[in-house]
Amino acid sequence: MDIKTISTTPFEGQKPGTSGLRKKVTEFQQAHYLENFVQSIFNSIDDYKEKTLVVGGDGRFYNLPAIQTIIRMAAANGIGKVIVGQNGLLSTPAVSCLIRKNQAVGGIILSASHNPGGPTGDFGIKYNIKNGGPAPEYLTNEIYKHTQKISDYLIVDTPDIDLATQEKYWLDDMAVVVIDPVSDYAGLMEHLFDFDLIKAMFDAGLFHMCFDAMHAVTGPYAFEILEERLGALLGTVINGVPLPDFGGGHPDPNLTYAHELVEIMNSTNAPDFGAASDGDGDRNMIFGKRFFVTPSDSLAIIAANAKHVPGYRNGLIGVARSMPTSQAIDRVAETLGIECYETPTGWKFFGNLLDSKKINLCGEESFGNGSDHIREKDGVWAVLFWLNIIAARRQSVEQIVREHWATYGRNYYTRHDYEDLEPAIADEIMTTLDARIRELKGKRIGKQTIVVSDDFSYTDPVDFSITEHQGIRICLDDGSRLIFRLSGTGTEGATLRIYIESYEPDPAKHNENPQTVLAPLINAANELSGILKRTGRGAPTVIT
Ligand code: VG1
Ligand code: CO
């Protein structure tokens, strides 16, 4: 096989963000752009020769050409075997599952997750390590360093591999195995959840659900698991065919972008249960009949009900949440007598806690939760967790949530996103806030006093690595919090996220609209950030 060494020069800005490198498709289409990043991955890891690499993506535009390039570069760099999903499809959780199952050296995921796709949309690439999880900070930093000094990359000159058929091919010494993207993952789910119990609930014909795959990667997974194996009615899965441009939609399962599901779930004939997933299948949105479940509540409820699920019957050993995620799960952990860790935003920070068995459940406010079954957040897994709880408790989503609030109190929560801001102005907002954190301590917001005001910094309890500047945190003496941080996943302008939370123990006050309850804190946050004055924006782009 003819291995070619191609000369190249570095591109600026190939620095992975919260989850991989995300850029406009057009940027990725520049000659050598993808190749530079992929070679920098190989240059940053050891001991990959003759090992297995898992490769797949969420089906967005440029997925297939990128996979062909990665296969050629893997062969040239001495990988032993590439496992790739049929038609180039693999959800992020499925990649994690396959890395672990095949003891692969790692995996490359082609996705910009919830960002829009298509020729003018976004593309992304991320590297997962051998535990199946996202590359930790030291490795993404290392990859970035290599992108800044790269001078050549290795590639072989071979025709495209036919990814449409499940087949084993050879590129000289390297095997390329095209597999069914769903079956290993579905097998793992069957092992964790009580499929018989859930199937019996569907078979009885009284329980209906709608799953919106948003024309992204979870379609094939949902068809197989929900409709085939669990017997949900045909038609349960909507927008189930992955499309390169996600049908023109924005595959972000929130109240704004998953409006089709939101309308169905808020209609008079709403099904009992609704869910949606994002581009790469690691996020989930949970709905009951005309009843939205806040992701932070979903995490707490999953934790509180883990005993109903076979894979978690032995109990939770510890839990974790990202810093901006509401403190609802902290209360569950306290009742269970287990530790609750607080990490920076991004799944990579859960890896060490999961590997060292300090926790077996974790999640983020951004519609993501997961467990030690893999090392990524997992959308379909969360949906199955809810189905298992509903089938075991024989209650509606709303009843389950209300009982949870009655037991633990309600953490009112909202996130306001201001998208596509002028980056310099967004930076200025953060620096001004940062400059004020000392002075704010002891001040009052309404009747409450600010007890913590800092720039969140995290020391990993396993490897003691320190990650700083993870968001401005303002905590009040009644448990309320205001949090400000900039997104690390966007490709256009800057996104400011403001997270607001308060705690209400009194069940008589659990039926309010979060926006109303939180209004005084929202106003305080708006004032502190000077958002209107600095950006002219009178309202956020997305409210969750
Ligand atoms: C966002 C979320 C974060 C999540 C990340 C990747 O990051 O806030 O919780 O881990 O997306 O999710 P940021 O930096 O934009 O706030 V996904 O589904 O894009 O892999
Ligand atoms: Co995602």
Image (tube, helix red, strand yellow):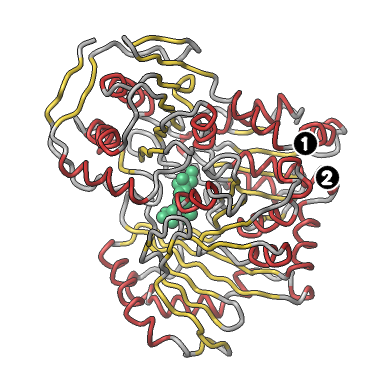
Asked whether residue 269 appears in the rendered view, the answer is no
Q: Where is residue 148 in the image (x, y as percent from the top left)?
A: 18, 44
- 18 left or right, relative to 25: right
Q: Position of residue 313 (x, y in %)?
A: 76, 46
**Sequence order check: which comes first, mark 2 or mark 1?**
1
Up/down of 417 relative to 310, above or below: below
Residue beneath disc 2? 392
- 14 left or right, relative to 168: left
Residue at 40% across / 64% down in the picture? 470
Report how far apart the C-alphas of labels 2 and 1 lie in the structure: 9 Å
- 253 left or right, relative to 439: right
Residue at 15% across / 42% down in the picture? 149
Asked whether residue 381 appears in the rendered view, the answer is yes
Amino acid type at image mark 2: Ala
Given residues 107 and 217, the one toward you in this image is: 107
Q: In which quarter of the image is the N terminus?
A: top left
Up/down of 313 relative to 432, above or below: above
Up/down of 426 relative to 217, above or below: below
Q: Residue furthest right?
A: 204
Q: Where is residue 218 in the image (x, y as percent from the top left)?
A: 56, 33
Residue beneath disc 1? 194
Mark 1 closeness class: few <14, some 14–19, many ≥20 residues within 10 Å: many
Amino acid type at image mark 1: Asp
Q: What element carries label 1?
A: loop
Given residues 414 and 182, the one toward you in this image is: 182
Residue at 61% across / 48% down in the picture? 285
Given residues 493 and 228, the one toward you in this image is: 228
Contact flag, marks 2 and 1 (Cβ < 8 Å): yes
